Amino acid sequence: MSAYVYQALRNRAVDYMRRRRNNDSLESPLPGDTGLVIADILADLKYDSASGTERREINRDINLALNMLSNDYKTIVIATEIHEQTFQDLSEMWDIPLGTLLARKSRAMQKLREALSAIDPVHYSPVP
């Protein structure tokens, strides 16, 4: 009986919190006496084509640098950085000791830095 009462109270609390949620529309006035609405602020945000181009160039450079790595190094970087897998999971999945994976990732990142520096020394040179 106590489990039923607890679940009923929990459901009531969740329902109450959902009803309290404040859903502002785009025509809601912003705080203060500015006379602006949320839609006015969003309309002023412009897409910066220069940053989009720069992002594409960086992605291209990273892909080039990744392709310069050996398969072991490339695999560990992609698994941890792109697929966000943990070293523990990879160790169990690949049946490779955890320390080996950590060392491999460290060497891979060093080689990736070197490759990026070779691609574009101006933008990717190491900070002194």
Image (cartoon, helix red, strand yellow):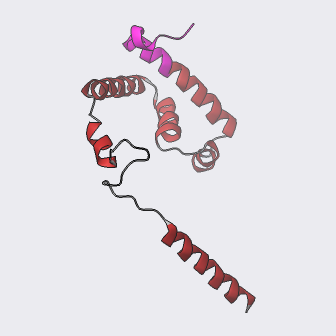
Q: Nearer the viewer, residue 56 or 79?
A: 56
With 4 as the anchor, is 48 left or right in this view? left
With 2 as the anchor, is 108 left or right in this view? left
With 25 as the anchor, is 8 left or right in this view? right
Q: Position of residue 112 (x, y in %)?
A: 48, 22
Quadrant of res 53: top left
Q: Position of residue 67 (x, y in %)?
A: 38, 27
The segment highlighted magenta reads 112-128
Q: Name the residue: 33% across, 45% down.
A: 35
Q: Nearer the viewer, residue 32 or 37?
A: 32
Magenta highlight on residue 4: no
Above or below — where is 8 with respect to 94?
below
Above or below — where is 74 with respect to 36?
above
Q: Nearer the viewer, residue 38 or 47?
A: 38
Q: Quadrant of the N terminus?
A: bottom right
Magenta highlight on residue 127: yes
Furthest-bottom residue in view? 1
Q: Nearer the viewer, residue 79 or 28?
A: 28
Q: Quadrant of the C terminus?
A: top right
Q: Position of residue 79 (x, y in %)?
A: 50, 41
Q: Main secondary structure of the magenta part?
A: helix
Q: Position of residue 47 (x, y in %)?
A: 26, 33
Above or below — where is 56 with respect to 81?
above
Q: Name the residue: 32% across, 41% down.
A: 41
Q: Name the residue: 43% across, 44% down.
A: 32
